[in-house]
Image: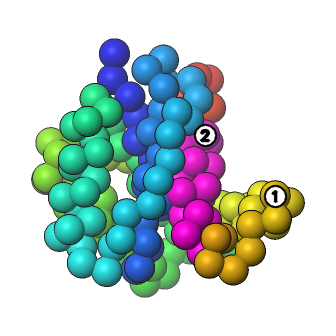
Amino acid sequence: MKRIMGIDYGDARTGVAVSDLLCSIVGSAQVVPSRNTDKAVADIVRIAGENQVGEIVVGLPRNMDGTEGPRAELCRAFAQRLREATGLPVELWDERRTTVEAHNILSQHNYHGQKRKNTVDAVAASLILEGYLAYKKR
C-alpha cells in the first residue's frame, strides 16, 4: 500500500501532509521552507520516500469565481517539478478557502502569532489532503 501526500505550496513555507497507509485519514503534517524551490522539492522527495508515498496532490488556488490567477500558475509549475523529481502521479486539487479554514481552526485552538505562522501551512495541507481522500472514497 502507498500513502497519499497533500501539498499546500507557498512562497516562504510549504505544508506537507501524509495519509495513513489505508489512505483514509491524514497521518502526519509538517512544514518545509520553500524560499529555495530546489531545496523544497528535495525535502518533499525525501519525505515522500520516507513515507512510502505513491501519489501527491497539490492545492491549486482558484479565485472564488473559479478562475485562476498568477498563484495558480506557480502551483502548476511546482506540481510539474514534483512529477519530474518523484516520478509519481501528481494531481491538482481546488484549495479555495483552505487557508481561511486553517486560520479559523488555529484561532479556535488559541494558536496566534509565530505559533500560527509556523503551523497554518501544515493545517492547510491537511485540509487539502482530507478533501482529496474524501473524493477518492466516493
Which residue is found at the position 31% from the left and 80% from the top?
35
Which of 64 and 90 lies nearest the eye of the viewer?
A: 90
Magenta segment boundaries in residue numbering: 117-133
Residue 44 relative to residue 59: left or right:
left
Res. 65 image quadrant: bottom right
- State whether residue 132 appears in this view: no
In this rendering, the answer to whether 60 lies above or below 11 is above
Give neighbour class at mark 2: few <14, some 14-19, many 20+ (Cα, 10 Å).
many
Find numbered disc 1 in the image and state the secondary structure of the residue it sits on. loop
Residue labelled with disc 1: 109
- For this orientation, the residue located farthest to the bottom is 70
Give x and y (percent) for residue 50: 26, 36
Which residue is found at the position 40% from the left and 41% from the top?
5
Which residue is found at the position 21% from the left and 49% from the top?
45
Which of 113 and 89 lies nearest the eye of the viewer?
A: 113
Q: How many discs appear? A: 2
Mark 2 or mark 1: which comes first in sequence? 1
- State whether residue 6 appears in this view: yes
Give x and y (percent) for residue 94: 55, 57
Give x and y (percent) for residue 36: 24, 78
Q: Main secondary structure of the magenta part?
A: helix
Residue 12 relative to residue 109: left or right:
left
Give x and y (percent) for residue 114: 62, 78
Amino acid of disc 1: His
Instruction: Indicate the colouring scheme.
Output: rainbow
Residue labelled with disc 2: 130
Residue 37 relative to residue 85: left or right:
right
Amino acid of disc 2: Glu
